[in-house]
Amino acid sequence: MFVRRWSLRSKALVLIALAAGAGSFTLVRGYAAEIEALRPATGDVVPVVVAGGDLTRGSVIEEDAVRLERIPAAYAPPEAFGALEDALGRTLATDLAEGEAVTTTRVGGNGGPVASLVASGLRAFVVGSGLPSGVLEPGDRVDVIATFGGPRPYTDTVGSGLEILSVVEQDEETFQAGGATGPSLVLLVSPETAEQLAHAAAFGQITVTIAPLDAV
């Protein structure tokens, strides 16, 4: 019977392979032991819903916009959603970058796409912009100026640095607050400013001017 003899080179290679395998096994076990040792500090791994891409404020969360990741509990943001179905259909109250956790503080409450973005104590007010389409977008800020007629015409600023929640493109037959043409703007305002804007729309002519982003 023929018995194959291993050369010294072959034996050396086998020994090296065995040593490498043993070393890898030891490293893996060591890493697992380190992870296990850290468990009391980091907690168990928990599911967290994160943005699957860059998402903008006002977007309604759909299934293809988010994904589920598993991270140590210590690193999971407070109020993070742990199940996809809990986040789907919610409206984002802030922008989210890819990989950021979706939390209850980053989405609006139940309601329509505008109402869910209006914080307690504020109001959403619609005005005609009188500006070309594409000039403004959500997050921009505007000033609203009203011109009143009568024996002594005058002009007054009724809102400064008002944030745009959404821009609504409308056709010519659609009602425009204040009679202005162009897209309508849904503005985030205080109740007092909402009253002033309503008065201006009823008794004056509204003009919208574009303010810098840091205007408040």
Image (cartoon, rainbow, N blue to C red):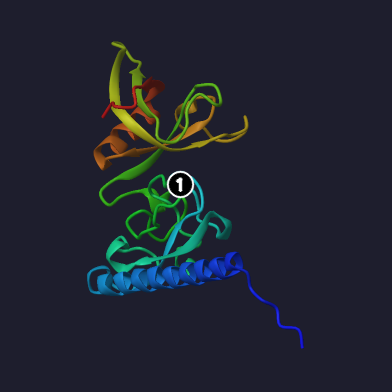
The relative height of residue 170 versus residue 93 in the rendered view (above or below) is: above
In percent of width and height, residue 45 lies at: 36, 71
In the rendered image, the vertical position of residue 146 relative to residue 169, given as above or below: above
Q: Residues within 10 Å of mark 1 (few under 14, many from 20)?
A: many
Measured from the top left, where is residue 2 in percent x and y?
76, 84
Relative height, residue 36 to residue 75 (above, below): below
Q: Residue at x 33, y 32 (%)?
A: 162
Camera-nearest residue between 210 and 11: 11
Q: Quadrant for residue 210, please give it.
A: top left
Farthest left residue? 41
Residue 92, how many percent across, how many down?
Answer: 42, 51
Q: Identify the image quadrant of the N terminus.
A: bottom right
Q: Residue at x 26, y 29 (%)?
A: 216
Describe residue 150's horizontal placement relative to residue 59 as left or right.
left
Question: Which residue occupies the foreground of this view, 24 or 52?
Answer: 24
Count of numbered circles in the view? 1
Say which residue label 1 marks. 58
Q: Secondary structure at mark 1?
A: loop
**What type is the residue that disc 1 sits on?**
Gly
